[in-house]
Amino acid sequence: MSIDVRIPAPLRRITNGADKVSVEAESLAAVVEALNEAYPGIKDRLCDESGSLRNFVNVYINGEDVRFLDGLDTATNSGDEISIVPAVAGGY
Amino acid sequence: MSYIKCLYCRECGREYPVAPEHVCEFCFGPLEVGYDYEAIKKVISKDKIQKGPLSIWRYEDLLPVTRDSGIDMGTGFTPLVKAENLGKTLGLNNLYIKNDSTNPTFSFKDRVVSVATNKALEFGFETLACASTGNLAGSVSAHGAKAKMDTKVFFPSDLEQGKILGAAIYGSTLVAVDGTYDEVNRLCSELADNHRWAFVNVNMRPYYSEGSKTLGYEVAEQLGWRAPDRCIVPAASGSLFTKIWKGLNELKDLGLLESVNTFMDLAQPDGCSPIVEAFEQGTYHVKPVKPETIAKSLAIGNPADGFYALKTIAETKGNAVRVPEPEVAECMKLLAETEGIFTETAGGVVISALRSLAKRGIISADEVVVAFVTGNGLKTVEVIEDAADPVFTNPDYKSFQDALNVWNKRSL
């Protein structure tokens, strides 16, 4: 079993149109590396120069915002579902 | 006409064509509308605006879409009321309330939705949708009905009944999501990627959010073409706050205001105050929270425009105010009892912040202060249920007098 990553529209040009890709990795950081290996350049879209997740990138593991977990250090397990979602404003 | 030129990324500046997109492909930054200000400068004038319709469309030259490209619900140009009674209570001589609860669906959301709907029609969308904390659902439903669009509104299932009914009446499809607003938003964001639906606050966001600028324009015009000395604005995502500031500055840059020296003060309820928290910590990095507030229209734990709101506060030497939850309903009553304006919880948050700033001496007595009241109180009656305390009487003269005496003594 592997980890499914849901790809938002702005990144699908890099993933050749795929809206979901599967990787095997034991942490979110390793997921990003694995994605980048398969789709070079995707890491730069997600992370800034210092390697942290960009301000306007939200990542959820099984629905939980990784900023409530351990960020890029969050452990990932086979069967997890990861969503990458751009920040969206609403409300006031 | 509209002078929209392009979309551009607020972070990296990269330009994009005018399309239903909201995110920079390269850095995920939010896209913003770019205008041909040189062309606008040639045509705009106070006189031209004043001869325009009594609605947001009098500022059409500064919006990303025109009135004629879609529908006009009569949104905007709401009253700016001199709040003499409340001002006296707080020791303020020039206090104004911008009462946006008089819009077609009783909140400022009609401004953003009017712009987004017309743009959606221009793009040829047949479905109008949104993720909502309540007011937006009502506004999108009404605009969708008028525009004869298929309409779908998504909201957290624990929403106030008044807001659910206020959307249902227009015949839209209601989607009650078992989750927080942030979760609703995430769902809609993923849906917007795969359906050709105009989510006003997702793929239409660059256009939608421009509608909030009209609050800044109107206040300046209604004050006789001058910027307020201070604006007090409720914040969830921080979008409204930054757009009022943008509106004032556009007027200055176009030569319609001499100067803008406005303190921009932002108000959030204690149970959901991630922007205030970042302000107090002295950082621009907003840490998301899980909202627990009675001001449900402000319950966004992950404020997308928090960063820009903090920049605006810093730039204007403004304040970020955290309002204790019990003061929300208390200040709804204060505004109603002093000014005859019945606002929803978000308005209670603003009035509480205003009172706090006045008490702390941060506002000086003669400043021209505008407090933005963004929605109607009938939408959130749950929080003031204990406000009703009638004199119970039989239908005869003496019974009434006796009952009134008892009631008066009890209230002393």
Image (cartoon, grey):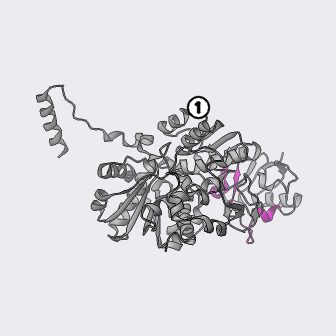
Q: Is B347 above or below relative to B157?
A: below
Q: Measuring from the top left, give residue B70's x and y in whole percent.
A: 64, 45
Name the amino acid type tagged 1.
Answer: Gly
Please tell me which residue lies in front, B67 or B310: B67
Report the residue at 48% width, 46% height from top.
B103
Tag count: 1
**Residue B315 in sight:** yes
Please tell me which residue lies in front, A84 or B71: B71
Report the residue at 82% width, 47% height from top.
A20
Please tell me which residue lies in front, B112 or B400: B112
**Residue B175 in sight:** no
Q: Measuring from the top left, give residue A48's x and y in whole percent.
A: 74, 68
Q: What span is colored magenta in the figure?
A: A42-68
For residue B171: magenta? no
Q: State the residue position of label 1.
A: B171
Q: Is B337 above or below relative to B266?
A: above
Q: Measuring from the top left, give residue B97's x and y in whole percent.
A: 39, 57
Residue B222: name its quadrant.
bottom left
